[in-house]
Amino acid sequence: MLLPTNNEEWGVLISGIKDQLPDGYPIYQTPLPSAVHRTIDHTLLSLDATEEQIDKLCAEAMEHKFASVCVRLRHVNRAISNLRGFPEGAVACVVGFPEGTHDTTEKEKEALDAVELGASELDMVLNYLLLREKKYMDVYVDILEVRKVAPSPVKLKVILETSQLTRDEIIAATVLAIMAGADFVKTSTGFKGAGATVENVALMRATAQLVGKGTKVKASGGVRLAEDCVKMLKAGADRIGTSSGVAIVQQLKGLQIEGRASASY
């Protein structure tokens, strides 16, 4: 797939992907209830989050073996210290959060600072205002520059803020993020409008498969119950961003004890 060099070429590529999308989407196999914890990014992004709350977040992540904890830059160092010696747990840091409209240089610095502190995953907010203006090259470069300062093995998740986008814009954002090197495309910040929906997760997964670079989908925003989590996994999500990870795994354990987990799956 040739890399576009201007907005018009991006428009042609995006339109071609859109035309290939199926009319319906498959239901994906989900992890066993006992393994769902490994899909969860345990999240605390409140501006007024305290060090004690970060400590609790990390303790819960270690207890339940979540995929990561996701925090703001000022809490990365503390999270790293808490999770030191715990190989299963990664620290993810948000970048350009939650607006996404920061200058690219600001996003680069935030990403670099996070990685230097030890973050191994970045959740970057796409500049959806530029996307809505069809300034595709600007959006692509914004993501690419962050990818350059935080190359693999750092995982880059690009937050589309789907509540602010039309279906066509979600397709465009997904294509741009993948072509710029995203490891994941993510639905929402949880700070603006509706969060993840089954329809948007399925659309992002189908688009990612057509682009064909192995990019995965993270569902985030409003995922608070085990039922919500399972729906997102069935729609094609590989990661779940939530501040309710403990409640979700406890609910799934309850279903297993009652013998009802298979019904939910």
Image (tube, rainbow, N blue to C red):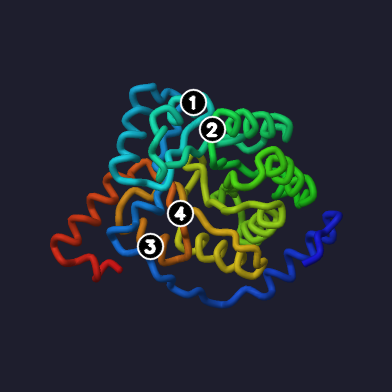
Task: Specify which label sits upstream in the sequence, 2 or 1.
Answer: 1
Question: What numbered label is drawn on residue 77?
Answer: 1
Q: Separation of disc 4 and disc 1 at Cα?
A: 23 Å
Q: Return the residue nearer the eye: 226 or 59.
A: 59
Residue 15 to residue 249: above or below? below
Task: Specify which label sits upstream in the sequence, 4 or 2.
Answer: 2
* Residue farthest left in this picture: 258
Instruction: Name the secondary structure under disc 3.
Output: helix
Instruction: Name the secondary structure under disc 2.
Output: loop
- Mark nearest the camera among 4 and 2 is 2
Q: Callout 1 environment at 10 Å: few (<14), some (14 to 19), or many (20+)?
A: some
- Residue at 52 percent across and 57 percent down: it is 217
Q: Separation of disc 3 and disc 1 at Cα?
A: 34 Å
Q: Separation of disc 4 and disc 3 at Cα?
A: 12 Å
Q: Position of residue 60 (x, y in %)?
A: 30, 38
Quarter of the image for the N terminus: give it.
Answer: bottom right
Q: Are marks 4 and 2 in contact (CB under 8 Å)?
A: no
**Residue on which disc 2 sits:** 118
Q: Are marks 2 and 1 in contact (CB under 8 Å)?
A: yes
Task: Specify which label sits upstream in the sequence, 4 or 1.
Answer: 1
Give amino acid for label 3. Lys
Instruction: Name the secondary structure under disc 1.
Output: helix
Q: Return the residue nearer the eye: 182 or 251.
A: 182
Question: What numbered label is drawn on residue 231?
Answer: 3
- Mark nearest the camera among 4 and 1 is 1
Q: Position of residue 220 (x, y in %)?
A: 46, 49
**Residue on which disc 4 sits:** 239
Q: Callout 3 environment at 10 Å: few (<14), some (14 to 19), or many (20+)?
A: many
Give amino acid for label 4. Arg
